[in-house]
């Protein structure tokens, strides 16, 4: 008589073994360790992209103002309430309707006007020591301007040339140029 030996098959389990779980955790840890150092540079690159967009937006608005006012830049002349070269004059001339001489028109005025050239306040600077600031330093110089050595304002604007820049000496991510050069 031949007896057969029956082998019991292993019952099916719906759970992972401890070894499988440890292997998955180890792989995830390795992936996280390789990705974490890149997060600050990704954030900084996003800030630089935001800066470029802000600069383009404001520079186009300044050029539109100059075109509409026969070559005069914002804050180069008085706005009717504030002196030429003042931050208030710049902001009012960019955000409100003005006549051909740059005088801000009242909202009830039926006189034809130009603008507004910006529909919101000057944006916050996304980079540099003064990031999350939107203060402006207005200068009246001929020729190219550059950032201050110890900036007190996030933006710098030349009312004689219409040049608008980020007032930061920090270098961009790739190290090729300071932000004010953009």
Image (cartoon, grey):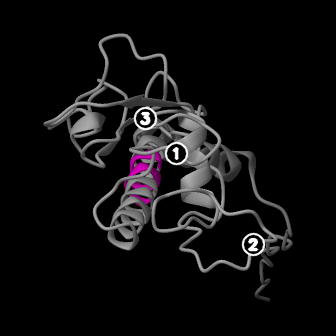
For label 1, the crowd category at 10 Å Cα-Cα, with few meaning under 14, some 14 to 19 and many 20 or more, is many
Instruction: Tell which circle, 1 or 2, labels the residue nearer the N-terminal end.
Output: 1
For label 3, the crowd category at 10 Å Cα-Cα, with few meaning under 14, some 14 to 19 and many 20 or more, is few
**Residue 65 picture location, percent across and down:** 42, 65
**Residue 174 picture location, percent across and down:** 21, 40
Residue where numbered disc 2 is placed = 109
The magenta span reads 47-53
Q: Would you place residue 181 above or below residue 59 in this image?
A: above
What secondary structure do most residues of the magenta stretch adopt? helix
Say left or right for 94 vs 128: right
Of 60 and 115, which appears nearest the observer? 115
Instruction: Tell which circle, 2 or 3, labels the residue nearer the N-terminal end.
Output: 3
Residue where numbered disc 3 is placed = 37
Which residue occupies 62% across, 67% down?
Answer: 97
Say left or right for 124 vs 37: right
Residue 164, picture quadrant: top left
Q: Nearer the viewer, mark 1 or mark 2?
A: 2
Of 161 and 9, which appears nearest the observer? 161
Q: Nearer the viewer, mark 2 or mark 3?
A: 2
**Distance (Cα) linking label 1 and label 2:** 20 Å
């Amino acid at each position: 008589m031949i007896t057969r030996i029956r082998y019991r098959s292993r019952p099916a389990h719906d759970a992972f073994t401890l070894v499988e779980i440890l292997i998955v955790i180890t792989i995830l840890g390795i992936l996280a360790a390789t990705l974490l150092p890149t997060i600050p540079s990704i954030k900084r690159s996003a800030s630089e992209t935001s800066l470029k967009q802000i600069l383009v937006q404001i520079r186009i608005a300044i050029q539109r103002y100059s075109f509409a006012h026969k070559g005069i830049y914002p804050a180069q002349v008085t706005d009717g309430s504030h002196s030429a070269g003042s931050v208030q004059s710049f902001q009012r001339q960019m955000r409100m309707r003005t006549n051909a001489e740059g005088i801000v028109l009242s909202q009830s005025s039926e006189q034809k006007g130009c603008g507004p050239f910006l529909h919101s306040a000057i944006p916050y600077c996304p980079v540099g020591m003064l990031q999350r600031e939107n203060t402006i330093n207005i200068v009246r110089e001929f020729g190219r301007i550059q950032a201050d050595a110890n900036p007190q304002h996030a933006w710098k604007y030349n009312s004689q040339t219409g040049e608008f820049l980020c007032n930061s000496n920090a270098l961009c991510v790739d190290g090729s140029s300071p932000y004010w050069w953009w």
